[in-house]
Image (tube, rainbow, N blue to C red):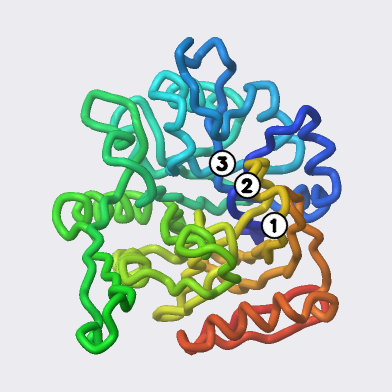
Amino acid sequence: MSDVNMVLVGDTFVGRPDPDAVFKPVKHLIQGADIAFCNLETVVADSSHIDQYDRDHRPRMDESSIAAYVRAGFNFMNQANNPNTYHGLHALVRSVEVLEPMNVAHGGAGRNLAEARKPAIIERNGTKVGFVCRTSVGTPEMAATVDTPGVARYPVHTLYEAPARVHSNPGLLPVVHTVPDRGVHREQLTEDIRKARDAADVVIVSWHWGLSPFQVYPGAGAGEVEVMEYQKEMGRYAIDCGADMVVGHHPHEPQPIEIYKGKPILYSLANFVHDLESFKHRKLMALLVRCLIRDGKIQRLGFVPGVLNGNGPPVFTRPAESPEVVDRIIQMSTPFGTRFEVGQEDVAVVLK
């Protein structure tokens, strides 16, 4: 086995007319990798595959644009997410069909539940890396069934508890608890991780989950929304089942990095490029994760810090040039006991 260099970025949706120009400033960070991962935060389907009465203005990308992702270097795309179903199941199926002939590994969506759940295997330099994809964001109707299209959805229950001092302080915000399904969906996840473990040298669970700060209250900043209970429980559970790493996306900003039993849980990879109008005037923190796989194991993990002005792409820098991003990620990860080594080119995560 030769070394495998992998890069991972978060939510990616390019809605501009020239997607190649969008990727050009960051292309050099992606193209050199053997495996380049992104969360494909959109459905890929031309208007002819959209219902004529569809009025949803949320992300959709023309099929011709996906080639720019490939030219930029991306060769694995997560499809287990909520935007994949904004324009109906015909469009979702078309999105799967578009990726199939392009030599792009993808997972998390399909024509039926078996296809959506199926671990995706990508082989580079004699090493096989398997991805198991799930989403806990979105409506129950978007879930694939035995005989209908959809995504690999993992349901989570939300419970609200009155805080201890609510009687003396009426109006206090409730304590929020999130409880992941512990029945059939956990059994399916366990089965899929074990299938990937049997077929691959390295297993990664990709999970669309969590909350973004501005989903909770206006004006919130990075790290002001805690990692949800279910994220911690299921991230650790995935590793207990045999995963080597868990990568999360959806919160649109970085969340903590945890090392659990020597294996990383990246709770949120943040935005990479996101052409949703609501991001146009936001300034967000960003990160690009680098991972070295050697002899079938993750030997090194690090991140390149960046700042994303509006829709992106981010401006990635050396750690010394983005101390506020580095400090924030270290600060939010400290409660998990994670240790870092700040280098000249990136920030290494101590795995042992």
Report the residue marked by disc 3. 40
| Residue 325 visible in this rendered orientation of the protein | yes
Looking at the rendered structure, the secondary structure element under dot 1 is loop
Looking at the rendered image, the disc whose residue lies closer to the viewer, 2 or 3, is: 2
Instruction: Name the residue rendered at 25%, 82% in the picture.
Output: 163
**Is any atom of residue 202 visible in this view?**
no
Decide: marks 2, 1 in contact (CB < 8 A)? yes
Residue 57 position within the rendered picture, expressed as x and y whole percent measured from the top left: 55, 29
Please tell me whether mark 2 sits on a helix, a strand or a loop.
helix
Residue ID at (59%, 17%):
46
Residue type at numbered disc 1: Arg
Pointer 1: what residue?
282
Q: Quadrant of the N terminus?
A: bottom right
Query: Where in the figure is residue 58, as x and y percent of width and height?
Result: 54, 34
- Quick check: 70 above or below 12? above
Q: Secondary structure at mark 3?
A: strand
Whole-Å distance between the Cαs marked 2 and 1? 8 Å
Q: Position of residue 9 (x, y in %)?
A: 63, 55
